[in-house]
Amino acid sequence: MQNLGILFILTNLVSVTAFMSGITLIADYACLISSSSSEKHEVRRLNPSVDALHFLDMDHFRTLTPCDDFDSTLDSILSHSPDTDAELVNWVDCENNKIKTLTRSMIHKYNILHSGAGILPVNGQQIYCHQRSPDKRIFPNLLDMFVGGVSQSGEESRVTASREMSEELNLSSPSSLSEKLFTTTICTSYNRCIVDCFQYDIAPSESSNIILQESEVQWGGFMDEKWINSAVDAGAADSDIIQQLRDMKINNNENEWVPDGKLVWQAWQAHHQKSNNQQRK
Ligand SMILES: *[C@@H]1O[C@H](CO)[C@@H](O)[C@H](O)[C@H]1NC(C)=O
C-alpha cells in the first residue's frame, strides 16, 4: 500500500512536470527508462517530505513510460555541445548499460542516473566515519560512513573506489580494497546513482597514512557499527548523541548524516544480514 501511495505521487509529479517543463522530466526519465531484464531491481529512494526511506522495484518504474514528446526534449538537451575539458560521466539505464556520455555538470543538473562507488573503510570491528568539510557545495558539515564518488566515463567502479580512497584519505593499498560486494541504486531529488559497494580493510600499519584532504573532509574517526546505527536512527532530537558529537569536537549540532550515505548504509546492513543468513543455512 505504501508503495502505491508513492507511485501515485511519482506519477503525478511526472505528468505535472511534463507540462511545466520538459527539462525537469529528464530527471525522472533517467530513472524510469525501461529495462530489458525481468530481474527485480530495488531502488532506494528518499522521500524528502517525510524523511523516510522507501523502496520501489523496477517493475513499478517500468509501468511509467515517458510521454511522446520526451525524445525531442532529450535531443535538445543533448545537442548542447559539451565543454571539451569537462569531466565526462555515463548516463546509464537501470542495468548500468551506457546510454550516452554527458558532462558531469549535466548529470548533476538534470539528476540523471549514473554509476559510482561507495567504500566502507573498516579496521576490524570499527568503521572510519568522516565529516565533510564546511566548504563543500553539497552537504557541508554532514557526517558520512562511506567514501564515495562518481565513476568517470569508462571507469570500472573498483578503479573509482581506489581513486576516491586515495584522494579522500590517502589510502591506496590495492590489496586492502575488496572486490565489489553488492550493488544498490539510490534515488533522491539531487542524486540518482547505481552504487557498487566495496570494503577497504585498513591495516594497523596503514592508519597512520590517513590524511584528510582539507577541502573534502574536516574530521574522521573510527566508530562502532552499533554507535553508527544509533546515531543514524536518532536524528536531531537525541541529546545523548548530540552530546557525544560535541564531546568528540564534531561540529554537527543536528546529528546530520549524508542522505546518500544513509541509503547505502541501509543496503549494506541488508546485504550483511542476507549473507549472514546464508552462512547459517
Ligand atoms: C600517504 O600514504 C603513503 C602510503 O601510500 C605514505 O607513504 C605517505 O606517508 C602518506 N602521506 C602522509 C603525509 O602521511
Image (cartoon, grey):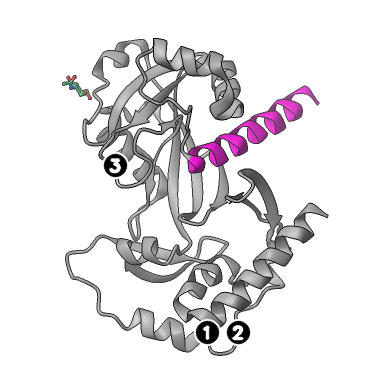
Number of marks in the image? Answer: 3
Secondary structure of residue under mark 1: helix
Find numbered disc 2 in the image and state the secondary structure of the residue it sits on: loop
| Relative height, residue 249 to residue 154 (above, below) | above
Q: Are marks 2 and 1 in contact (CB under 8 Å)?
A: yes
Residue 262 drawn in magenta: yes
Residue at the image point whose x is 49% and y is 68% from the top: 27
Residue beneath label 2, please? 67
Q: CA distance from mark 3 to mark 1?
A: 34 Å
Of tags 3 and 1, the one toward the viewer is 3
Q: Label 3, on which residue?
A: 136
Which kind of residue does numbered mark 2 sit on? Answer: Cys
Percent across and percent down for residue 249 are: 35, 15
Beta carbon at label 1 within 8 Å of ligand 1: no
Which label number is shown at residue 130? Answer: none
Q: Residue at x 40, y 43 (%)?
A: 158
* Relative side of 277 to 251, left or right: right
Label 1 sits on residue: 70
In this picture, is 280 found above or below 13?
above
In percent of width and height, residue 78 lies at 36, 79
Camera-side residue of 119 and 158: 119
Q: Quadrant of residue 91?
A: bottom left
Q: Amino acid at mark 1?
A: Phe
Q: Earlier in the sequence, mark 2 or mark 3?
A: 2
**Residue 170, image quadrant:** top left
Question: What residue do we see at 37% from left, 52% from top?
Answer: 151
Looking at marks 3 and 1 on the same chain, the residue that comes earlier in the sequence is marked by 1
- Is 263 colored magenta in this rendering? yes
